[in-house]
Image (spheres, grey):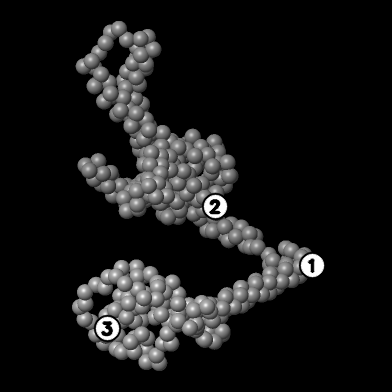
Amino acid sequence: MASDLAAVNLLAEESTIDPSSTLPSFLEMKLVQETAHAGRKAVHSSIDVVVEKCEHAMRNYPVGSLRQKLAKSLSQIFRRYQAELEMVVHYSIERHYLLSSANSLLSESLYGLRRSKISGNGSISPMNKSDGIRAALILSIWPFLKSRLDNCYEYERSKRDDEQANANEDRPIVSQIFEKNRSMFIYLYPFLHLSHDGVKLAYQFAYLIGKSVHFDPTLHALGLVVRRITKQDIDNSDRAQQKRVMPPLENQIPQHIVTRLKKAAAVGIASALMVGWLGNFRQELIRSRRRLVLNNESPIGSSSGDYKASEVVVPPPPTPRPPLNDAEERIEPPRNKTLCPICLQKRVNPVASSSGNVFCYKCLVMHIREKGPKCPVTSVQCERSQIVQLYEPNAVTITTPDIDTNNN
């Protein structure tokens, strides 16, 4: 925090700001650097949000389902390769802006800056495609490698501290060589890290006092310089944009091909409409058949959304036909359906035979005992075990002793 305040005070007292100069001031370059750093943090936070969404979905989906497995796989991929994904995103963004008409990084374009190629004698020329690709690669790969080396250094140092307590002199030669290399890396990396930061600080100080036109060592290595956009750049960009205007489609494609394409489109649209109409017609036929089966006489032209099957009324099954040879022994049922066909009185303890006719319990049992196991009305086979007791609301129920059918 103290270093940031010192930098702000130093920038406030900068005397090299010249609005008429092509080179941006030190303050502008520092703002560009902080904007780029904020952009990298935003990408990192976005990937963290995606990981949290995947983990939340993984907890909510059923265990073992396809969606739960997919969310788990995505969460593991984003967690394990987060740094690589950030590198790819940074490379894609910076490459797009460097190869566009802006010829600058995203953070530099926000402050009206662009990159140009500078020669040894100080002449400036436009940046070509290969320069933009190299700059995008360095700006995306180098932070990734730097973070990996920092993590490796912290891991190896903590691992060495843990192994010092259990040191063993009789280890294999390969392990001893690996241990020496690791110790050398742990010893040299802080000096490399300090040298990297020192070189960057030296370039920035030289830029501040006007001794260098390169704010960063990567710019010097690529032979690029960051400068302000001039009126000539704006005019060149407008002319290039006018050249890139696409001519009308009729001028690019021959007329006979355009005519054939229009005919093919018309035939395709007509065929799609015809197929859709035939499909709807077939669906209407199926619905009309269903309505007839369900005793629903709705008009065929009704829409499918308003169609609802009416309540199905199932008629009772017809009474089985009696055998022709027992016509004389059958009893004619009375017109009043509430009377017993045998005693012609109001049914007492109503029961149904196997044919569905209803009798008094006593009358039906006595008839079966005297005439045999058959229905008095239809002469259909009716054992006593097939008699079904009914519960009619207006029927007379009298408790009677069971009738012994074995007594003659």
In the image, which disc is placed on residue 256? 1
Q: Give 81 or 277, whichever is nearer the viewer.
A: 277
Residue at numbered disc 3: 348
In terms of secondary structure, where does tag 3 sit? loop
State the CA–CA distance, disc 2 to disc 3. Answer: 102 Å
In terms of secondary structure, where does tag 2 sit? loop
Which comes before the other along the chain, label 3 or label 1?
1
In the rendered image, the vertical position of residue 26 relative to residue 346, given as above or below = above
**Image position of 212 (left or right of 398):** right
Residue 221 percent location from the top left of the image: 49, 34
Which residue: 51% across, 53% down? 102
In the rendered image, the vertical position of residue 268 relative to residue 77, given as above or below = below
In the rendered image, the vertical position of residue 199 relative to residue 59, given as above or below = above
Q: Give 51 or 309, whichever is nearer the viewer.
A: 309
Q: Give 350 or 287, whichever is nearer the viewer.
A: 350
**Image position of 249 (left or right of 362):** right
Q: Amino acid at mark 2?
A: Ser
Contact, mark 1 vs mark 2 (Cβ under 8 Å): no
Q: Amino acid at mark 3?
A: Val
Residue 359 percent location from the top left of the image: 34, 81
The crowd level at tag 3 (other Cα within 10 Å; few <14, some 14-19, many 20+) is many
Which residue: 25% across, 41% down? 3
Which residue: 41% across, 39% down? 81
Quadrant (top left/top right/bottom left/bottom right) for the C terminus: bottom left
Query: Mark 1 against mark 2, which lies toward the viewer?
Result: 1
**Residue 306 showing in the rendered view:** no
Which residue: 56% across, 45% down? 127
> Which residue appears farthest toward the top when viewing the image?
170
Query: Mark 2 against mark 3, which lies toward the viewer?
Result: 3
